[in-house]
Image (spheres, rainbow, N blue to C red):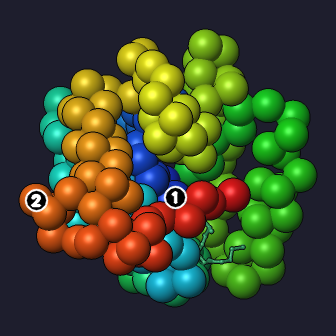
């Protein structure tokens, strides 16, 4: 019988409960699912690739058919390399659709043999995005129920260190001016 291997590509900066919800759904319909974290040299992520990988590995350890990997370059090339036939992407609301459709059609143009499958996360995650989680966490809001506890913990640690840099805490290894100039720019 034909086995279906899918990849779930994304930035996962950080991974959220919405991502986990989609991974769980994907693991039920695909024989194998690879969560593929994009290494994007043009972006300045909050979490390193290694951190994101560790978080996702911990989050998905309970799924036998889910693995985590990283990739660079085109998603379609990566999919071919790992012999996946399907790309999984989540659609939360109609506003996601236009971008996702464009991407799916471009991927189809590049590699007609690959199919994109869209799945919807649970409604309670329909407003959830990594960008908003980063913003809420950085501004001191509660992110409980939005990300797994291990991710919340990592976010708290990151934000603590960033505040120490900004305040020129010698323990953080920088002067106030260095801390300010090196503090992270807010991302869109
Ligand atoms: O989590 P994100 O940031 O929405 O994921 C976007 C991602 C990684 C799926 C997309 O940017 C991507 O596939 N990038 C790899 C480069 C590529 O293949 N570009 C052409 C896409 S049509």
User: From the viewer's perspective, is 132 left or right of 56?
Assistant: right
- Residue with the mark numbered 2: 171
Query: Answer yes or no: do the residues labelled 1 and 2 have beta carbons within 8 Å?
Result: no
The quarter of the picture where residue 47 lies is bottom left
Residue at 23 percent across and 33 percent down: it is 153
Residue at 33 percent across and 54 percent down: it is 167
The quarter of the picture where residue 152 lies is top left
Give the vertical position of 57 relative to 93 (above or below).
Answer: below
From where the camera sits, is residue 9 visible? no
User: From the viewer's perspective, is 129 left or right of 54?
Assistant: right
The quarter of the picture where residue 49 lies is bottom left
User: From the viewer's perspective, is 163 left or right of 85?
Assistant: left
Looking at the rendered image, the disc whose residue lies closer to the viewer, 1 or 2, is 2
Q: Residues within 10 Å of mark 1 (few under 14, many from 20)?
A: some
The circle on residue 10 is 1
Picture quadrant of ligand 1: bottom right
Give the vertical position of 86 relative to 44 (above or below).
Answer: above
Q: Can you tell me whether the CB of the residue at mark 2 lies under 8 Å from the nearest atom of ligand 1?
A: no
User: From the viewer's perspective, is 102 left or right of 81?
Assistant: right
From where the camera sits, is residue 178 visible? yes
Residue at 54 percent across and 75 percent down: it is 43
Q: CA distance from mark 1 to mark 2?
A: 34 Å
Direction left: furthest residue: 171
Q: Residues within 10 Å of mark 2 (few under 14, many from 20)?
A: few
Point out residue 108 in the picture as x, y percentages from the top left corner: 75, 72
Point out residue 161 in the picture as x, y percentages from the top left corner: 25, 52
Tell which circle, 1 or 2, labels the residue nearer the N-terminal end. Answer: 1
Q: Can you tell me whether the CB of the residue at mark 1 lies under 8 Å from the nearest atom of ligand 1?
A: yes
Q: Secondary structure at mark 2?
A: helix
Point out residue 166 in the picture as x, y percentages from the top left corner: 37, 58
């Amino acid at each position: 019988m034909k086995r279906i291997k899918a990849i779930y590509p994304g930035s996962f900066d950080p991974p959220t409960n919405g991502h986990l919800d989609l991974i769980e759904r994907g693991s039920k319909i695909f024989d194998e699912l690879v969560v593929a974290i994009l290494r994007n040299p043009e972006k300045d992520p909050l979490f390193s690739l290694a951190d994101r990988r560790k978080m996702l590995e911990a989050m998905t350890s309970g799924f036998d058919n889910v693995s985590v990997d990283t990739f660079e370059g085109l998603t379609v090339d990566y999919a071919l390399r790992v012999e996946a036939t399907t790309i999984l992407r989540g659609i939360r609301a109609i506003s996601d659709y236009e971008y996702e459709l464009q991407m799916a059609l471009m991927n189809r143009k590049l590699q007609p043999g690959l199919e994109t499958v869209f799945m919807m996360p649970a409604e309670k995650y329909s407003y959830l995005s990594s960008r908003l989680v980063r913003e809420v966490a950085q501004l001191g809001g509660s992110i409980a129920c939005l990300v797994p506890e291990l991710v919340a913990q990592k976010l708290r640690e990151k934000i603590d260190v960033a505040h120490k840099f900004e305040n020129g805490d010698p323990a953080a290894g920088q002067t106030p001016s260095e801390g300010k100039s090196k503090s992270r720019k807010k991302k869109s």
